[in-house]
């Protein structure tokens, strides 16, 4: 007895490889989005600023080319689940644009529904007001690459770009981001003497009894020493009466710290009498 063969449409678990969706996304961005807006969609969705692939332009439209550069960069640098999540969020941002046609919006909703097996309701991704200093600092620190991006690559009206080549560049940007939020910021305040020496803090947030220390990993040799530098800094900072918490920000653009998770654990767990949080920026994701 012969049984009929039924061909079933399978729900895709690979949104990033859905060529139909990506082609539609490219066309929608060409018709409804600015270049800067496209970059913001991918960055706010969780893509790293360094993932955008610098490829020879094959599209006549810069906007279409911009989307393709991001898609290729995500495929190369993100894990499958992270890539799917980034693309899902990008589509969510586009669905919130009132200018796109209902036909295009319905296509996007349908593709997302096929991906996750349920109707997709685009949620607001606009950051909420930080509720305390801890939430504010975490947001500003993790957002440093996002704040750098338009200054490095996307200035308006042909203005010269800004290069972040040492820790002073990163510190200046972080200071500017802090100023609207924190009233009393003390730059380079000296710590009490410890073992016969004293050191200067990058930023003491006096009212919050919090210090922010930013380091820029210059090369392989410095990557091997930056942990020792932080250990010495911590020994000094815990002597200061207005330092109860340290935010240590390590800007490691080239990924020279070989084991960032181990580095973070070692520094945070070996500090006494002082709460330490370590952030290695940009974040690196396990594949």
Image (spheres, rainbow, N blue to C red):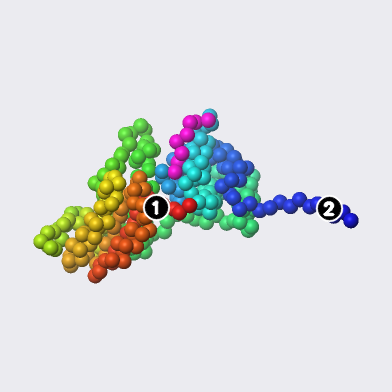
- Looking at the image, do the residues carrying marks 2 and 1 touch, with CB atoms under 8 Å apart? no
Extreme residue in the bottom direction: 273
Residue that badge 1 annotates: 283
- For numbered disc 2, what is the local secondary structure? loop
**Any part of residue 183 in sight:** no
14 on left or right of 229: right
Residue 254 lies, in percent from the top left, at: 35, 45
Q: Is residue 286 visible?
A: yes
Determine the secondary structure under disc 1: loop
To which residue does mark 2 refer?
4
Depth order, front residue of 156/248 = 248
**Magenta-highlighted residues:** 51-58
Residue 140 screen position, x and y as percent: 34, 54
As drawn, is 54 to the left or to the right of 226? right
Residue at image point 19% right, 54% down = 187
Q: Residue furthest left?
A: 196
Q: Residues within 10 Å of mark 1 (few under 14, many from 20)?
A: some
How far is disc 2 from disc 1 in space, using C-alphas?
A: 52 Å
Q: Residue 220: give x, y in percent of width and height.
A: 30, 46
- Whether residue 175 appears in magenta in the rendering, the answer is no
Q: Which residue is painted at 28% across and 42% down in the image?
A: 165
Would residue 42 be found to the left or right of residue 200 on screen? Answer: right
Give the image quarter of residue 239.
bottom left
Residue nearest the viewer, comparing 154 with 22: 22
Q: Nearer the viewer, residue 149 or 262?
A: 262
Give the quarter of the figure containing the N terminus: bottom right
Q: Earlier in the sequence, mark 2 or mark 1?
A: 2
Residue placed at 58% from the left, 49% from the top? Answer: 15
């Amino acid at each position: 007895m012969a049984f009929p063969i039924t061909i079933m449409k399978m729900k895709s678990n690979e949104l990033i490889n859905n060529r139909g969706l990506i082609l539609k996304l490219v066309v929608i961005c060409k018709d409804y989005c600015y270049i800067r807006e496209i970059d913001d969609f991918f960055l706010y969705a969780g893509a790293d600023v360094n993932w955008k692939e610098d490829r020879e332009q094959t599209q006549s439209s810069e906007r279409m080319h911009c989307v393709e550069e991001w898609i290729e960069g995500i495929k190369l640098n993100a894990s499958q689940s992270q890539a799917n999540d980034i693309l899902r969020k990008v589509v969510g941002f586009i669905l919130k644009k009132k200018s796109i046609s209902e036909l295009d919006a319905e296509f996007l909703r349908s593709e997302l529904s096929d991906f996750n097996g349920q109707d997709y309701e685009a949620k607001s991704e606009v950051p909420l007001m930080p509720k305390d200093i801890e939430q504010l600092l975490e947001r500003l620190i993790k957002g440093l690459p996002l704040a750098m991006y338009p200054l490095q690559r996307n200035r308006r009206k042909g203005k010269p770009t800004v290069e972040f080549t040492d820790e002073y560049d990163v510190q200046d940007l972080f200071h500017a981001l802090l100023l609207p939020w924190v009233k009393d910021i003390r730059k380079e305040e000296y710590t009490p003497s410890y073992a016969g020496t004293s050191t200067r803090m990058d930023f003491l947030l006096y009212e919050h009894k919090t210090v922010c220390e930013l380091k820029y990993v210059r090369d392989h040799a410095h990557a091997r020493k930056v942990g020792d530098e932080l250990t010495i800094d911590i020994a000094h900072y815990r002597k200061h009466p207005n330092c109860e918490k340290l935010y240590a920000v390590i800007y490691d653009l080239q990924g020279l710290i070989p084991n960032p998770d181990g580095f973070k654990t070692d520094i945070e767990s070996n500090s006494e009498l002082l709460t330490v949080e370590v952030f290695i920026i940009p974040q690196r994701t396990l594949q």
